[in-house]
Image (cartoon, rainbow, N blue to C red):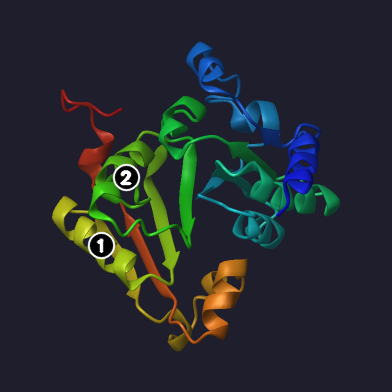
Amino acid sequence: MGKKKKLLHFAENDTFLNMFQPDYPQLQKGFPLLNRWNSEFFKNTNPITLEVGCGKGEYTVGLAQKYPHRNFIGIDLKGARMWRGCKTSNDLGLYNVAFIRQYVQQLPLLFGPAEVDEIWITFPDPQPKNAKRNKRLTSMPLLKRYAKILNPNGIIHLKTDSEFLFDFTMEVIQEEGHELLVSHKDIYAEQGFEEVKSIKTVYEKIFTEKGFAINYLQFKLNPNYFQSDDGSKK
């Protein structure tokens, strides 16, 4: 994407009422929608699904279309990519969609405890270098961040073409005592899972056309992740 086009997308992002781009000083002062997403933005009590590393927001928008009685939020740092999902949601008149441009590490400053009911991680960068293992979106440090905002009964979904990331996540689940619900290294070879198969990101279409298997995991976090150091619930 050319620089001029990116700048146009950034400018249009500023006009979208469902695009939020708080900087860190603003988060430190207190994000106004913290603990208030349903009451102040969505104006309902429907459950919230978060897409982490949403890219162009295909899953966020696709799920919002399929499930109008749920709320969906995508978070990423790439504003030019998120422009696509945000524009599509506005063109379609979807009122159950929002996007946040910010680091995933800042999630506890954007959402209150248990404010999110479900998390999707779709085709993230696998960060294969060991020095970047903590940047993998299913690493222990980031899972602990998710626990600060996720309902203790909430499900985390991982959909990836990377067998490396799939195996890494399986190791984390086993080592940390998380509850594995579903595990398939080729989800399209399995029966059912229409919610997983019916929405394809740009990257997924490229990978499947090239014959890559699509890996899928579904799990719940260890209940201990939702407790403070003194053993009390967060």
In this rendering, position of residue 195 left or right of residue 170 = right
Dividing the picture into quadrants, the one containing residue 129 is bottom left
Tag in front: 1 or 2: 1
Using a 10 Å C-alpha cutoff, classify the residue at mark 2 as few (fewer than 14 neighbours), some (14 to 19) or many (20 or more): some
Quadrant in which the N terminus is drawn: bottom right
- Residue 201 in sight here: no
Give the tally of numbered discs: 2
Q: Looking at the picture, does residue 227 appear above or below residue 203? A: above
Pick the front one: 10 or 16: 10
Q: Amino acid at mark 2?
A: Leu
Distance between the Cα atoms at labels 1 and 2?
A: 13 Å
Using a 10 Å C-alpha cutoff, classify the residue at mark 1 as few (fewer than 14 neighbours), some (14 to 19) or many (20 or more): some
Q: Residue furthest front?
A: 3
User: Residue at the spot x=53%, y=81% of the render?
Assistant: 208
User: Residue at the spot x=54%, y=34% of the render?
Assistant: 102
In this rendering, position of residue 146 left or right of residue 191 = left
Q: Which residue is mark 1?
A: 168
Q: Amino acid at mark 1?
A: Phe
In this rendering, position of residue 138 left or right of residue 195 = left
Q: Which residue is mark 2?
A: 143
Label 2 secondary element: helix
Q: Which tag, 1 or 2, sits closer to the chain's start?
A: 2
User: Residue at the spot x=49%, y=76% of the render?
Assistant: 193
Quadrant in which the C terminus is drawn: top left
Residue 96: where, in percent of width, then height? Answer: 70, 45
Q: Looking at the picture, does residue 25 appear above or below residue 141? A: above
In this rendering, position of residue 183 left or right of residue 107 = left
